[in-house]
Image (cartoon, helix red, strand yellow):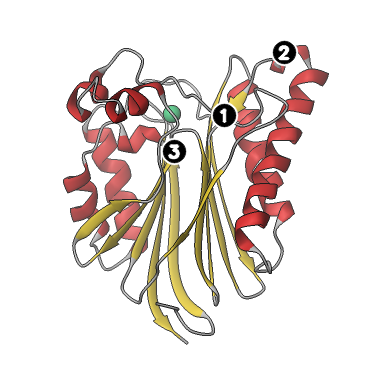
Amino acid sequence: MSPGPSVLIEAASLTDVGLVRERNEDAFGEKSLVGGRLFVVADGMGGHAGGATASRLAVEAVEAALGTIPRDPPRALREALEAANRSIHDESQRDPSLRGMGTTGVVLLIGSGGCWVANVGDSRAYRLRDGALDQLTRDHSVVAEMVRLGVLTSAQAAVHPRRNEVLRSLGTAPDVDVDVDAVDVSVGDVFLLCSDGLSGVVDDAAIAALLADDSAEDASRALVEAAIGQGAPDNVTVQVIRVHAPV
Ligand code: CA
């Protein structure tokens, strides 16, 4: 269903270093576009300053690439993440201390023409509708691939020693393969973008219950607190996007 000429959206973003890591290498961005809104979460990796630099560069590149709801959103999203990939890779080649840095990227674009999600890596987008939580993105990770092949169950994947290994990332190679999907959107939907610091420790049922809160800000805080309640072994980032009404 089309959300109408434009959509009234309530959004809140929150990031937390967690209880174990010394640095927060996640980053997020929110941008109002002509005719819509853009959201992005990036989860950086790489020693020293690399991870935080990669995630920050990803957010900056995606925001710079999109100023209006584009004519061809899937293509524009793909190009935005390709630009992010080039920006991070170029910087890693210039500065030896940043060699090998990379980041995930998940982007949600919502506006009068519809809703689109793009991703690289294992940061996720979800949609809560009528109490049912759907994962909109496919993880590009070793364990997700093993689950798809039937080698691991989801429960085994959650505690597997290779659970943090991604198969695709932004910045670690000159080129990147980006997944993009058009997503159905209706009034009442709640979208969530998050890093694996949330999805790795808080299960879908708990995420669904917390996302159902009437306030995006309260939901974002409750989600981060739920990860902290599970020991928050990783940086935690959430963006909660509630679709209130067509206007
Ligand atoms: Ca992470």
**Residue at image x 34%, y 63%?**
190
Instruction: Name the side, left or right, on which 11 lies relative to 203.
Output: right
Q: Is residue 66 above or below residue 79?
A: below
User: Residue pushed farthest front?
Assistant: 149
Residue type, numbered disc 3: Ser
Q: Nearer the viewer, residue 123 or 52?
A: 123
Asked whether the residues under the numbered discs 2 and 3 touch, taking CB atoms below 8 Å apart as contact, a structural biologist would say no
Any atom of ligand 1 within 8 Å of the CB at mark 3? yes
Residue type, numbered disc 1: Ser
Q: Quadrant of residue 131?
A: bottom left
Residue type, numbered disc 2: Ser
Asked whether the residues under the numbered discs 3 and 1 touch, taking CB atoms below 8 Å apart as contact, a structural biologist would say no
Counting residues from the start of the chain, the first of labels 3 and 1 encountered is: 3
Q: CA distance from mark 2 to mark 1?
A: 18 Å
Judging by the rendered image, the residue that carries numbered circle 1 is 169
**Residue at image x 62%, y 62%?**
73
**Residue at image x 45%, y 42%?**
15
Judging by the rendered image, the residue that carries numbered circle 3 is 123
- Image location of residue 13, percent across then percent down: 45, 53
Marks 2, 3: nearer the viewer: 3
Q: Quadrant of the N terminus?
A: bottom left
Counting residues from the start of the chain, the first of labels 2 and 3 encountered is: 2
Judging by the rendered image, the residue that carries numbered circle 2 is 97
Instruction: Name the side, left or right, on which 236 lies relative to 65.
Output: left
Counting residues from the start of the chain, the first of labels 2 and 1 encountered is: 2
- Image location of residue 246, percent across then percent down: 44, 84
Describe the element under mark 2 as helix, strand or loop: helix
- Image location of residue 123, percent across then percent down: 44, 38
